[in-house]
Amino acid sequence: MDEQLANKIKKIWENAKTNSPLTQKSAVCVSTIDSAGFPQSRFVDLKEIDQCGFTFCTSYNSEKGNQLSQNPKISLLAWWDHIGYQVRVVGKAVTISNDRADKFWFTRSKEAHVATTCFKQSEVWNSTVSMENQYSSALFASPTSIARPSSWGGYSVVPNSIEILKFRANRVHIREQYLRDGSSWKMRLLQP
Ligand SMILES: Cc1cc2nc3c(=O)[nH]c(=O)nc-3n(C[C@H](O)[C@H](O)[C@H](O)COP(=O)(O)O)c2cc1C
């Protein structure tokens, strides 16, 4: 994505976070494709927007991680109600570097580190009680600093297309669609 477009979306996102009434201010929906061809959606925390794309972190061995290893096609969707913006991204997921993964890992709380390291995301478990017990024991036994497991990292959604929709009460939404055109990007307006 070119610098101008990345900065435009980043500015909308910063504004959305600053004024957000939500507890989870950076949650966005990402959809991957499962082995039967069905889309699978879930929320993740958006960590960064830059020219490389839209970055989120997760376990590489999770369901989404396994799906992305088979098919990197992905979509990312945000709706920031309080500022009236929808951002819709379609592209390919690219694994981030270990350095970037480390950077994001150390922004997380100890509780999050323990929850990540004592479970295998998306695998089946038997009961909520035993899950709490597993977590409490791991938290009690945990060292001061927990290293990032190699199975945890992140993906950048490298966009092929981006739509920025400014919501309007009269439904005459302003829809700017940006499409990759070689090394540059072209914008066209879509009817609401
Ligand atoms: C608000 C919110 C934020 C979340 N953030 C993340 C995240 O950043 N990374 C992550 O792996 N899961 C996150 N989750 C959990 C995911 O929605 C999902 O349950 C998990 O990643 C497993 O998905 P999968 O089985 O499709 O791989 C979040 C859930 C919610 C509701």
Image (cartoon, rainbow, N blue to C red):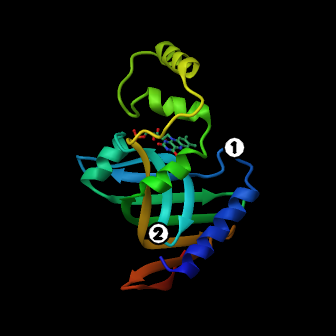
The amino acid marked with disc number 2 is Cys
Q: Is residue 171 above or below residue 181?
A: above
Q: Could you tell me how many numbered marks the image carries?
A: 2
Q: Is residue 74 above or below residue 24?
A: below
Whole-percent x, y for residue 170 in the image: 68, 70
Residue located 43% across and 28% down the image: 119
The amino acid marked with disc number 1 is Thr
Residue 168: image quadrant is bottom right
Whole-percent x, y for residue 125 in the image: 39, 21
Of residues 116 and 127, which is closer to you in this image? 116
Around disc 2, counting alpha carbons within 10 Å, would you say few (fewer than 14), some (14 to 19), or many (20 or more)? Answer: some
Disc 2: which residue: 52
Residue 173 in sight from this viewpoint: no
Q: Which mark is residue 84?
A: none
Residue located 49% across and 38% down the image: 147
Q: Nearer the viewer, mark 2 or mark 1?
A: 2
Of residues 178 and 165, which is closer to you in this image? 178
Q: Secondary structure at mark 1?
A: loop
Q: Is mark 1 within 8 Å of ligand 1?
A: no
Disc 1: which residue: 23
Q: Quadrant of the C terminus?
A: bottom right
Whole-percent x, y for residue 148 in the image: 47, 40
Q: Secondary structure at mark 2?
A: loop
Residue located 50% across and 62% down the image: 54
Whole-percent x, y for residue 92 in the image: 36, 63
